[in-house]
Image (cartoon, rainbow, N blue to C red):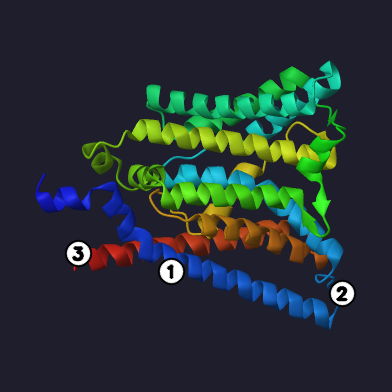
Amino acid sequence: MTTQTAEASRPEVVRLGRMERARRADLDILAVFVVAQVGCVIAGLVAPGKFAYVTTGNFQVMLQAIPELGIVAIGVGLLMIAGEFDLSVGANYTFAAIVMANLVTGYGMSPWGAAAIALLVGLLIGLLNAAVTFWLRIPSFITTLGSGLFWEGFTLLYHGAGFVSFTPTGAFVTATSGSFGVLEVEFCWFIVLAVVCGLLLHRHRLGNWFYAAGGNATAARAVGVRTRRVKTIAFAIAGVTAALAGILATSRVQSIVPGQGTDLPLNAIAACVIGGVALMGGRGTMLGIVLGSALIYLIQDVLLLLRAPGFYLQLFVGLLIIAAAGLNQFARGRAARQGNG
């Protein structure tokens, strides 16, 4: 390997080579989100009777709903940046929440202890996904597709098809589903997690390794990055964030039903792609993931306020995914041409 090639393949250089494109992608999605918000506010002020967007109740619902997808998307996005997928996060979300609810309702365990065990369950599912992927050399897309189906079936075997009630009291409820005026505690968890993971991704050496492992694993290994270990950490984070989302949602609605998280994996991937995360790995930002999650729920909220049929959400999100993936591919091709030039 020549000196020039070795320098270009270092994780720090790999990451810096993408930073300008990442900033442009962030500005693009931020501009779309701001324009959409301004349009909704104007429409809500002009026709409040037909489009009740600018209301306290609507903002509270949004601040409750965005974290359910956003927290899962944070873990999925980090894993995608590292070059892998996790399609089992929906089953993980449901199974971990049911374990917590059963421990509290059926065995009288403290909700804090039950929540800790649920997070451990999510962590172990993430680590198991990594182990199967790397030991058996199976693509993570296939591994986690099978894992998701397995945990969905195991949830039914463990609990059955009925819902589980969950009615904790005291500090646990305040810490997981309380509110401070319009601001919801769940949204605070989402923002804190996004800040922590954003610092990890953009300011810590591990974040460099995520980008390097997802962008060019061969070059990353050549300069000493332990790509399997790095990707295993990303799998573990995805597992924990899925379980955390399930805990917060179950505490808010005080029940959980098997199969409740079925749509989460694809919606989380959609949020990441819309936010500028590359499907092939190696590119994406935490701000983009957050805005992509918020934009998906904004579309859903608008359609609900307009009383549009439910399939309209799938239609618009599908179009957004195709458009975002097309823009990502165009940006990748343009960067490659500039590099060759």
Residue 191 numbered mark, or none:
none
- Please state which of the two labelled residues, at mark 2 or mark 1, is closer to the viewer: 1
Q: Residue at x 69, y 63 (%)?
A: 299
Q: Are marks 2 and 1 in contact (CB under 8 Å)?
A: no
Residue highlighted by disc 3:
340
Is the residue marked by circle 2 packed among few (<14), some (14-19), or many (20+) residues within 10 Å? few
Q: Position of residue 211 (x, y in %)?
A: 37, 48
Q: Residue at x 67, y 24 (%)?
A: 117
The residue at the far bottom in this view is 46
- Secondary structure at badge 3 equals helix
Q: CA distance from mark 2 to mark 3?
A: 54 Å
- Secondary structure at badge 2 equals loop
Type of residue at label 2? Answer: Lys
Is the residue marked by circle 1 packed among few (<14), some (14-19), or many (20+) residues within 10 Å? few
Q: Earlier in the sequence, mark 2 or mark 3?
A: 2
Residue highlighted by disc 1:
24
Is the residue marked by circle 3 packed among few (<14), some (14-19), or many (20+) residues within 10 Å? few
Residue highlighted by disc 2:
50
Q: Position of residue 136 (x, y in %)?
A: 39, 22
Q: Residue at x 56, y 69 (%)?
A: 30
- Secondary structure at badge 1 equals helix
Q: Position of residue 269 (x, y in %)?
A: 55, 48
Taking 201 as reference, is 93 left or right?
right
Q: Earlier in the sequence, mark 2 or mark 1?
A: 1
- In which quadrant of the rendered view does residue 112 lie? top right
Q: CA distance from mark 3 to mark 1?
A: 21 Å
Q: Nearer the viewer, residue 173 or 52?
A: 173
Q: Nearer the viewer, residue 153 or 34?
A: 34
